[in-house]
Amino acid sequence: MIEPRPSVTRFVAAVVRAELARGGAHDSDVAQRILTRLCQALGPLIGPAGFDVLLARSLVFTRRAHPVLAGITAGPRGTITGLDEAARASIAGQESAIAIASHFSELLVMLIGEDLAMRLLHNVWPGVEEEKK
Amino acid sequence: MTTRRNPTIGLLPSGVPGLDTVLGGGLPEYSFNLIAGGPGAGKTTLAQQIVFSRASAEAPGLYFTVLGEPPLKMLRHVQQYSFFDKAKIGEAVRFVNLSAEAMEHDLGSIMKRMLAEIEEVQPGIVVVDSFRTVAHASASEAQLQEFMQRLALHLTGWQATTFLVGEYESAESHSNPIFTIADGIIWLTQSIERNASVRRLQVTKMRACATMPGLHTFLISSDGIRVFPRILPRTERRPRAHEKAKHASTGVDGLDAMMSGGIPVGESALFVGPSGSGKSAFARHFIAAGAEAGEPGIVAVFEEHPGEYLSRASAFGPNLASFIKRGLVEVLYLRSLDLTVDEALAAVRLAVERKKAQRVAIDSLSEFELALAPSYRDDFRESLFRTISALNGLGATVLMTVDIVQSFGEFGLSPHITEFLADVLVLQRYIEIEGTLEKVLAVVKMRTSRHDTSVRRYAIESSGIVVGEPIHGYGGVLTGVPLVRVQGAATLPGLTRDETMILRQLDELGEADARALSRRTGVKGSALPLALERLRQLEYVNTLRRKGLTRYRTRTPKG
């Protein structure tokens, strides 16, 4: 079990807000949109297979932390299924997105260190600044 | 008539300490190279160190990872090295994973992806790690050869210096086309010899470069790879005018007097003696004398921890602690497992350069030799000789100590250390005179100065080392068993020289057996019983039996 550190959660929350602000996405689509961008950015670096493994592992932690997301599963190239069921279980799309992306980011931090992981994540969303505490 | 000018090949600093010396100046620009070796040899570390050193926003590094170390792990591991710079990731250094293409076993898709990345990034340096896994995707050798030719051509055309990293055996170098196409080949090996791990690097090929031949040891630490070139650049010592005929005081007045003032500046001296004979005390006096004159000094120790070394120093001879505090003296502790001779000597050399040291004490060579991994001992003498030359070339005066096991009557150093290493040789010995052990020394050789050739007693007092008067009246002092020397004029009438000597010793001892007399006089074999028998017949000595042994005593003169 991993608990995303506050700096990661704050950054991911800012990313979710930025993605919603870009428009063109429904609240329930935002998690998928974030994962797709992560896959496009990190796939060349860690390999598509590497990305898939990280996503699958982070969903395990997400499901444990948020039982209402028990139905989500990872597909290839950053795709996830089961978000609709989660929405029906009355968890907001934003909340799902924050939970999934935070666990993914925390896992990346644990594997390659916070400095490098956060640098890579900031490169995906260059304009996004997390809220100060 | 036109003058033909050869195209200049730029040499790029590799960022790997010592490697440029081996490469003959640096990495040839736009070359297509292979880093080969077995698992764990350090191939990836070498490639990453070069990339992080060379890559910049203007000339980025493109690092293709294929089916070797998973990229996540590689990113995790590379951060352990000090050369890693996270600010370079993404812009100056781009990692691109080709495992998906490699798994399709299609060289065409690999090539397409690589060319697309190269054209987009326009890198100055490219690494393919591991190229061996790319080769596995080829259907035939001809296809692989064509792939490599295209890649080499493309990368050179795009002005990239390239490194293919791969696990290869040396036997493959005759059959694998990659060895033909590559401009340069750097082999890394790691072998276990007895219980020590030995890493070596060899540049077997580097087109248009005068590389340094042979195997060069290297070390992997948290700073990455450091190569220790087998042959150091030759340093020609040019003594400054004021140094001519100048001697560095040993800090021991009596010894300085024997050596025309001390060790000639910029030369090396070897102090050879048995355990406890005070070699380290001489080393400390030498360093302290320099420090008192404002000359920085380095003491290299191996077995003894610097703390112990210094506390012992305060008990016997000058206390170096105050000089260390003032920054005039530095104690280098060079004990580590599997220490390589090149690594240790490089540490001494770097310290001398950093501190601008004028004096160096290596205390002792015997401990240094013991601290080395066994496989390095054969190289010890050669590396030591080169390093001392380099230190002398820097203008430093070097004092080394070496332990010998004093076997009476013989004198020899370790098979790996020889006295030719030094310009000055001082021999210390224990001798036994009339049942008492004493210390003596002799200046055996000074290549460039006159010196006192006498054998002198010395003592280590709390105030320092005191060198005494020459030993007179004995011969063979350096064997440890001095023999009373009998002058020809003192030979007794009617007696031979040996007979006179035996009689005098017997007179001194009162009574002795043949063995004791032989030891005191050096008369051996059948000469001794013959001489004793003649002395008995001439009534100079009497014989008596005690506990089954024949003993001799001088006769009281009649009348």
Image (cartoon, rainbow, N blue to C red):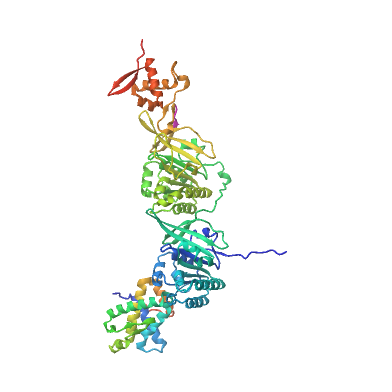
Q: Report if residue B226 is visible in the image.
A: yes
Residue found farthest to the right? B1
- For image coordinates 41% across by 22% down, the residue present is B501
Quadrant hosting residue B71: bottom left
Q: Quick check: is B471 in the magenta stretch?
A: yes
Q: Which region of the structure is painted magenta?
A: B468-472
Residue in the foreground of this view, choosing between A24 and B3 = B3
Numbered marks: total: 0
Horizontal side, residue B544 vs residue B165: left or right = left
Q: Position of residue B119 (x, y in %)?
A: 53, 77
Up the image or down, A83 lies above or below B100; here it is below
Q: Position of residue B240 (x, y in %)?
A: 57, 47
Q: Quick check: is B373 in the magenta stretch?
A: no
Q: Position of residue B36 (x, y in %)?
A: 47, 64
The C terminus of chain B appears in which quarter of the rendering? top left
Quadrant hosting residue B160: bottom right
